[in-house]
Amino acid sequence: MVAPHAPSRSVGPLGLTFVVVGGVVGSGILFAPLFAAQQAGPASIIAWPIASLMLITVVLVFAEVSAMLPVVGGLGLLPTFSHGQGVGIAIGWVAWVGYVTAAPIETQAMLEYASNEAAFDWLFVAETSSGGESPLSLPGIAAAAVVLVAFTALNAYGVALFTRVNTALTWVKLLIPVAVTVALLTQFSSAPIRETGFAPEGVAGVLGALTTGGVVFAFLGFRHALDLAGEARRPQRTIPVALVGGILICTALFTALQVGFVGAVDPGDLDRGWAGLDSGGANGPLAALLTGLGMAVLAKLVLADAVLGPFGAGLVSTASTGRLAVAVAQNGLFPRTVSVFSRHGVPLRAMVLNLAAGLLLLLVFRDGWSELLAFNSGAIVLSMSLGPVTVVALRRQVPDRVRPFRLRGLPVLARVAFVVVSLIVYWTGWDTMIKVTIPIAVGIAVLAWRMVRDPELRRALALRSLVWLGPYYVGLLTLTFVGRFGGGRELLPSGVDMVAVALFALAFFEWGVRSALPAAEAAAAVATVREVRTGDSGRDAAGLHE
């Protein structure tokens, strides 16, 4: 039975595309050109299209399954249809751990930028005895709490209001970087490239830009569209257009900005190479570069974007995290009451739960909030691993189900996508993934407690479909330990490590697909979602897991 006040389908192609763009273009755009250039020099320009091609494979497989099953909280709920409730709980919990940290991270990033102005320096403690990060002051914590409440309040009045606010913010977040890019391109010079050569660090530098430089991780904001898929009008068209279109828009923007940044660097600043290029101070490299070029007005706009960017990203994160909490509740880990939608068609109880978690994180991590980034990136990437497996399994389980967006070459693309996700987890590194293990252990403990309290949940877990996830995670964790990234022991030679991860991923892909539910069980689960046909407006579709 569908929950009362089910979500209305009021998100169109532009609104959902801007959810993708708003999730990708956050505060990171202000530092990403520098970090990528430090790793690869001018070759950082090609790192963005390479990352885009890698992520497009992941985006496309999610586009097929999300258009076929446009459910609320898709990232956490979609695996349930192919692999059962146990896998859905596991993936939903891991995703939620990453998602719930996003709004606090964006909030603190916004306040960090604002505190560079003297009028707002009260947001953070002036000095720390350890010389490390400056923690939020007590008034700063209060200000952060107000921002988090504002995110929830703006989302509480319906997805239509949210998309209007987010679209307006995203236009600003796009126009300012576009203006900065055009300004930098007018000052473009090939002198920096001639000074060091196009690829001073070779292939290793480009790989460093993809990983350490944060290029790949910048694109992961596309996930928010998956969680709002259940509220999309004409999902068979809106979802693929938004996912692919949003990635392509961001690729064009980031690539052009990188070209402008590289061409505007003073060759005299490269005496220590690109790796020694200065960060530009607290206001960031773009503001410093523009100030040096005499473009003070644009530099001020960059600082304004530094506040608007995290605010918009936090708004999007609050919306998608609420939908994901609904999926976790529908799978049985959270109480069922969390999945109820308000009269405005939003999961208000889920968002209040997330708000409480966010406020707690603000207090716990006020002295070292950057640790939240480890949970955020590692957990979210790991939760994407089931997408490629799910879409192939459903092709076998429900071959006659209407697929409004049917991907050609799916068997190959899905395997490539699974390898890509596994590589990203590997690139995340040992230091991050060992931290992600902590909330995974907590989730196992919570699930065990729920199973003791609810025998029906224990019978519904489909353990045969779940068992492969344990060895997959342990194997990835081991690869990060012996690997070359993020605190790994560097026991695998460069190049060999990538091949090892790819072969490992391909083997577990086959195990994952073979572990799917029997066709009859999957068909029964899929039948609970209204079939979307070509030409269907979707306005009367519930799109919920009943």
Image: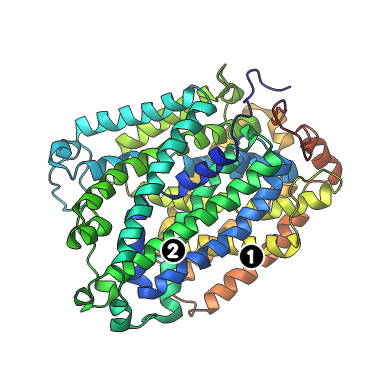
Q: Position of residue 392 (x, y in %)?
A: 75, 55
Report the label total. 2
Categorize mark 2 by other alpha carbons within 10 Å: few (<14), some (14-19), many (20+).
some
* Element carrying mark 1: helix
Name the residue that disc number 2 marks: 255
Question: Could you tell whether 448 is left or right of 284 in the image?
Answer: right
Question: Could you tell whether 238 is left or right of 147 in the image?
Answer: right
480, above or below 305, in the image: below
Question: Could you tell whether 203 is left or right of 34 in the image?
Answer: right
Name the quadrant of the C terminus: top right
Name the quadrant of the N terminus: top right
Report the coloring of the rendering: rainbow
Residue 420 visible in this rendered orientation of the protein: yes
Indicate the quadrant where residue 205 lies.
bottom left
Q: Position of residue 542 (x, y in %)?
A: 70, 27
Q: Earlier in the sequence, mark 2 or mark 1?
A: 2
Indicate the quadrant where residue 85 lies.
top right
Categorize mark 1 by other alpha carbons within 10 Å: few (<14), some (14-19), many (20+).
many
Name the residue that disc number 1 marks: 505
Which label belongs to residue 462? none
Residue toward you, 134 or 262: 262
Three-letter residue code for mark 2: Thr
Question: Could you tell whether 1 is left or right of 478 in the image?
Answer: right
Three-letter residue code for mark 1: Ala
Residue 101 visible in this rendered orientation of the protein: no
Q: Position of residue 210 (x, y in %)?
A: 45, 66
Indicate the quadrant where residue 277 lies.
bottom left
Question: Which residue is at a point 27% across and 43% down the rendered structure image?
Answer: 304
* Element carrying mark 2: helix
